[in-house]
Image: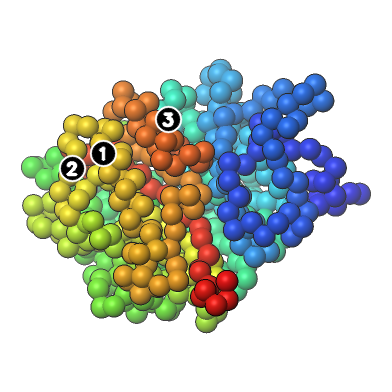
Amino acid sequence: MSSPASLAKETPICYHLAPDKRLLDAGCAAHGCSHAVPGRFSGPDMPPCLMGVQHHTVIDLGKVRRVAMMVTPQCGGDFKDEAWEALSTIRAILRQQGEPMEVTMQTVFLRSREDVPTAELLFEACYGEKMPLTLFVVQPPCEGRGIAIEAWAVGTTHAKVEHHDEHLVTVEYDGLRWIYASGGSLHREGRTAYDQSFEAFENLQAALRRGGAAFEDVVRTWLYQGCITEEVDGVERYRELNRARTDFFAGIPFDNRPVPTLHRGQAVYPASTGIGTLCHGLITACMALHTKRDDVFLLPLENPLQTSAFDYPKEYSVKSPKFARAMAVRTGEDVTIWISGTASIVNSETVYKGDAVGQTEQTLTNIEKLIAPENFARLGWADAGATLADLAKVHVYVKHATDYEKVRAVCERRLGRLPAIYAVADVCRPDLLVEIEGVAFSRVRKPNSEA
């Protein structure tokens, strides 16, 4: 029987599934794969693709391959047809990587809450015992489809993936152990936004403990809150989430993490996204890191253009949002930057009110300044940093569907060909029209004498 590597060399990669980017690429020889060239196999020898619109980035981290995928169906039909098309596209991308791959975490963006039960059944049937950590979020894809999927996968030739339960997946490679946990999906049903939020953090903590981790190991969280700017008894739901997060984090020793963290005395919190959905539920997930390696470090990033969220004045929230603008994870010579949800805020104030184009431009500028080498040097890592070209993917939240085309045009002009999903979602302030999160990969710079 042919090996996966030999099969990859014998089988051409369909032009429809060519990656948008390769980051930290050490060359094909390390993986036995074939580089895809858009259009190369588009002649009569290659059958037409019945696949969804997809964009993906391949990241080579030493011997381990990771793939970030953004998939939206295109062939039409009912919701089941769209879901199967998207899942089949992911499967096809992974089969062309030259080694066995497993999806570890995915976020499924849905047009309607009514489609959640069907989606759960279809995804369980597709993945079986290897079900990734999966979040079903009611944020309609801007393209008008019923579903879109953001998925992360890892090659299992050199990585071990364990699916503990529906709320917990762990991945181990190169002396690193990543823990992906979910607090499940909580719905309103008589609970206040504060109680719902505090319970969600407790659920996350319980899932982490089942994986042998603690909350101080968390480097990134995702908080999808229904009707985020709705007021209950005169208080926005997001402000109550912030109050609950502050109270819960008060008992977490983030400044004494097991992984060495450079913070120069400032507050240390995970990177995070807090974004709205179309129902009153609260969906939460987090990512934590364990390692005994002595060349792994964390650096919480703050933006020179912005007041740190945890220092916002009380006019924005009685208890300020407790998150870092980004969290950089340094593993040897590789640096991964998990960028929090970022919006058109300078200092602590919204800018370009009512202007979706201006807000998108400012948001991307904020991300650019946040991950820049100059900002890393300011915070203590003079040999690290990234540019917008180092982004592996972005997720763009657009408040009004009518702004989608304008927002997308700005993103494509500044980011180029990059895997992205655009979803309709309410942002955490009524005057914010756009929010963007992403992940960047880069390598540390060697001194000139060694270059």
Sequence-wise first label, 2 or 3: 3
Amino acid carrying mark 3 in the image:
Pro
Compared to residue 56, the image places residue 243 above or below, namely below
Does 175 sit left or right of 273 as displayed? right
| Camera-nearest residue between 303 and 282 | 303
Residue denoted by label 3: 141
Find residue 198 and report its horizontal and vertical position in percent. Answer: 27, 57
Q: Amino acid at mark 2?
A: Val
* N-terminal label among 2 and 1: 2
Q: Is residue 182 visible?
A: no
Front tag of 2 and 3 = 2
* Cβ–Cβ under 8 Å for marks 2 and 1: yes
Sooner in the amino-acid sequence: mark 1 or mark 3: 3
Q: Please identify the quarter of the rendering in which residue 204 is found.
A: bottom left
Q: Residue at x 73, y 26 (%)?
A: 42
Instruction: Tell me if I can see residue 172 in this picture.
Output: yes
Considering every residue shown, the one lying at the far right of the view is: 1
Given the image, on which type of amino acid does mark 1 rest? Gln
Q: Which residue is mark 2?
A: 351
* Quadrant position of the C terminus in the picture: bottom right
Q: Secondary structure at mark 2?
A: loop
Q: Which residue is mark 1?
A: 359
Please give left or right for residue 30 compared with residue 82 in the image.
right
How far is the residue under mark 1 from the one under mark 3? Answer: 20 Å
**Circle 2: is it few (<14), some (14-19), or many (20+) Cα within 10 Å?**
some
Residue 351 in the image: state x and y as whole percent.
Answer: 18, 42
